[in-house]
Image (spheres, coloured by chain):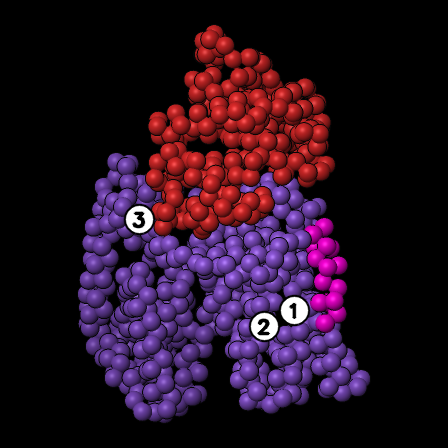
Amino acid sequence: MIRLFFNLEWKQFSRASYFQKGIAIKILLFLAAIYFGGAAIMLGVGLFFIAKKIKPDLDPIILVNNFLIYWFLFDIVIRFFLQQLPVMNIKPLMTIPIKRNTVIHYLLGKTALSFFNCIALFIFLPFSIVLLVQGYAVVNVFCWFLSIIILTFCVNFINFLINKNNTFFYSIAGVLFVFLGLETYGFFKISEPIGKAFNMLYQQPYLVIIPLLFLFLLYKKNYSDIRKGFYLDGAISKKADRVKSLDLNWVNRFGSVAVFLKNDIRLILRNARPKQVLLMSGLFLFYGLFFYTQSAYKNMPAFLAFASMFVTGGFLMTFGQLVPSWDSEYYKLLMSQNIPYSKYLESKWYLMVVAVFVSFILSIPYLYFGWDIFGMIAAGALFNIGLNSFITLFGGALNRVPIELNVKAKAFSNTNGFNPTQMLIALPKLVLPMLLFYVPYKIINFQAGLIVLALSGVLGIVFRNFFLSKIEGVYQKGKYKTIAAFAEKK
Amino acid sequence: MIVTTNLSKKYNENLVLSIEHLEIPKGQSFGLVGNNGAGKTTYFSLLLDLIQPTTGFINNNGVSVNASEDWKPFTSAFIDESFLIGYLTAEEYFYFIGELRGQSKADVDALVAQFEDFFHGEILGQKKYLRDLSKGNQKKAGIVAALIGNPEVVILDEPFANLDPTTQIRLKEIIKDLAEAKGVTVLISSHDLLHVTDVCERIVVLEKGEVVKDLATSAATLKELETHFSN
């Protein structure tokens, strides 16, 4: 039985879509895995010495214990976004003569092999080894390490319990931020009492029974939850969304592109994946904070130009690079209808322009950093509207990865739009604004840089129809390829 | 009139469709039958220019479909769920198709109203997105959407599959009415021999991509088809 399950797992793993990609992406994924794995191990090894250096008078294990609470809280937050209990997979197993209990144990058991659990192992195993080498008591270190791993599994199962409910998540994220705030400003250090508890775990090895008990209870709870919902209309059913009716008649004033624009607005508001993109692009607004606050970048205006472009370009780039893919689920319909490509593209362009405009309005608080910075953001916005939009749409046209609209992107399956052409296309997006600003800045002055960057955008707007018709050509040429690629099952 | 000439489609040396000559006159109800892999959907996809022919071409009302897009205004189709936009309600979807085909909201409402019987109260005003409807109800919405905008050629792939018996009977009436009263050329494919013989004036049997039978429907047709497929 177990052997059969393992066989299934192996096939699911080795035949997953991200392994079916080109060799270049395989290598990249492999390198990324090595990098992150290696980084975690290095951190694990170095943790002891780093702790010693920061607080020489404190035992490193005590310092680490003090901050473990943040590690675990952070772990929950990350998992909430990226890790989901794969309940849907049990549907084919429901009618086969296998005991339900076995299936559920298998389901819960296999989450133990999750990547997220490995991170903890990668960090705390080397750390524990270093502790042993440094002469710490074997039993204590071993039990402490065991407790940490058990608690990691607890986080694993807590996540599945709260995953269905956003309120839980926001309270945990809220608690994390409040604690962080209180800690930094020294009002109340949560790390102290919790740290004491972890120290107890270290000093009294037999206390490992507490996390173990905790884990047992959580497992039981998860088990009974799934057991209760082990029906087609239970835990594994997809929830039908409630229809939110939208009055979009005001869009009609956009004339011939209105049909598509209305559709795009519904696309974004009613599907999980585009909503995620919308959220992501909101975060881009804060990109400037990293750059404008660092004195190191003060004398590197080219980097500032780059950052300013990002402030208003978040939605444009994240949404735009997947432009025909958003419509991949019903691409055949579009291709058999009487649709002028130019109108279709123009509607997407309008959407991106509106997004840049809104981001620009929202970036007004950056005035705090002075007119120079704000001028850069304005010039960057013009560049986004006039040039970046077309470069992004062009890159999208070469991208033929189907998207499942109502499925959230998961960690490590999010290689959509991740191909060599995409990366080549991304290059001018990043380099062009820097060059356009830097060259005139070096030759003449700061203002000249701004003007050239802004003018490049204006030029793009003037030649809009030329660019759109060029991109239309790419669409027309790739029509059959695109249809075939979008029809492929994910 | 749809004229197919020397049409073939190969996937890596694998010939999936080869039709030397096939004429479908205007206003005919035309049925395509054949086992899985016979080339029915391939033929329809070629008709809609969704795949490229290896040789030959299809001429739809004087327009060569892989050379010009002028066939689109008078041709419509429902092949599979990829012709539906999952995040729209049925009404929104109908209006969207209507706008693409130059129909006002009132036009669409008037057309859709004729199909109230066919919908059986399960499509309109449902407060559900198309993706959350059952397979049969999705099909109903897709078929009616294909009738928006007075098309002259309507292509339906397996329209009877997944429909409940009541709806199947109503769909037969709709298809007959389209061809006889409105002069619309209707092309359907089906695995159900009884349905096709009921509905179509002419039935073509495909086998491994080739036309092996071309029958004008008569009382004897069903028997003949059954004998053909039982061997």
Magenta stretch: dominant secondary structure: helix
- Callout 3–callout 1 Cβ contact below 8 Å: no
Q: Does residue A161 appear in this view?
A: yes
Q: Residues within 10 Å of mark 3 (few under 14, many from 20)?
A: some
Q: Earlier in the sequence, mark 2 or mark 3?
A: 3
Query: Camera-side residue: B128 or A430?
Result: B128
Q: Residue at x 68, y 19 (%)?
A: B20
Tell me what hue chain A is rendered in: purple
Q: CA distance from mark 3 to mark 1?
A: 44 Å
Confirm whether the magenta stretch covers residue A464.
Answer: yes
Q: Amino acid at mark 2?
A: Phe
Subunit ID for the residue under disc 1: A
- Residue of label 2: A357
Q: CA distance from mark 2 to mark 1?
A: 9 Å
Q: Residue at x 62, y 85 (%)?
A: A373
- Residue of label 3: A236
